[in-house]
Image (cartoon, grey):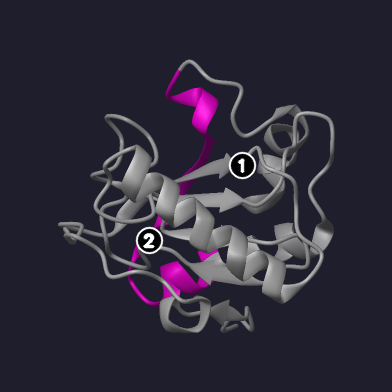
Amino acid sequence: MESQVTIITRTQWGAAEPKGREKLKSPAGRAIVHHTALPGCSSLDQSKKLVQSIQRGHMNDRGFDDIGYNFLVAADGVVFEGRGWGVVGAHTKGSNQDSLGIAFMGNFNNESPNKAALMSVKQLLQSGVSQGFLCPGFTVLGHRDLGSTQCPGDKLYAALPQLS
């Protein structure tokens, strides 16, 4: 079944041009889940502004070529294209060459992820497999599985099994 997930393209959210873009050499074997650790948004306009702000922070403050994540998802399940499919991200030090980085917008240390957001990410991952960007037997990991961090927050981390 093809996914019906809504993806807001880079053009639609007003992305700045990336300084550079490196393609993945093969389909990603892992989906690494993050949270933005910022307050969530209640409207599409707020979400677009937040994604723009995250991109500015990644490029201007951290020196990244672009927003670090491949995709970001709002609480209502709307998915924003970050670097997109088949592009090396800058989300998990030492693990970007064979993975897809997906950030849930919000702080999930104490708040649980919305069912709509979880469903959209599940559909996004299925779509990635059907398009050949993600290996059929891919692994879902939390950022904390690969680095010393609390990311993606205890509540989202507990929900990760729902994504595979």
Sequence-first tag of 1 and 2: 1
Q: Nearer the viewer, mark 1 or mark 2?
A: 1
Q: Is residue 113 left or right of residue 45?
A: right
Can residue 137 be seen in this snapshot?
A: no
Q: Where is residue 50? Give x, y as percent.
A: 60, 59
Name the residue at the top extreme.
148
Which kind of residue does numbered mark 1 sit on? His
Can residue 105 be seen in this snapshot?
A: yes
- Residue at x 37% of width, y 67% of height: 84
- Distance CA(mark 1)–CA(mark 2): 21 Å
Q: Is residue 101 above or below residue 136?
A: above
State if disc 2 and disc 1 touch (CB < 8 Å). Answer: no
Q: Residue 85 is drawn in which quadrant?
A: bottom left
Q: Is residue 135 left or right of residue 77?
A: left
Q: Could you tell me which secondary element the residue under label 2 belongs to?
A: strand
Q: Where is residue 54? Give x, y as percent.
A: 50, 52
Q: Nearer the viewer, residue 106 or 33?
A: 106
Q: Residue 47 is drawn in which quadrant?
A: bottom right
Q: Is residue 29 above or below residue 19?
A: above
Which kind of residue does numbered mark 2 sit on? Leu
In the rendered image, which residue does mark 1 sit on? 35
Indicate which disc residue 134 carries.
Answer: 2
Q: Where is residue 132? Give x, y as percent.
A: 33, 71
Quadrant that contains the N terminus: bottom right
Q: Is residue 134 left or right of residue 80?
A: left
- Residue at x 50% of width, y 24% of height: 145
The residues colored magenta run 125-147
Q: Is 135 inside the magenta-drawn segment?
A: yes
Q: Could you tell me which secondary element the residue under label 1 belongs to?
A: strand
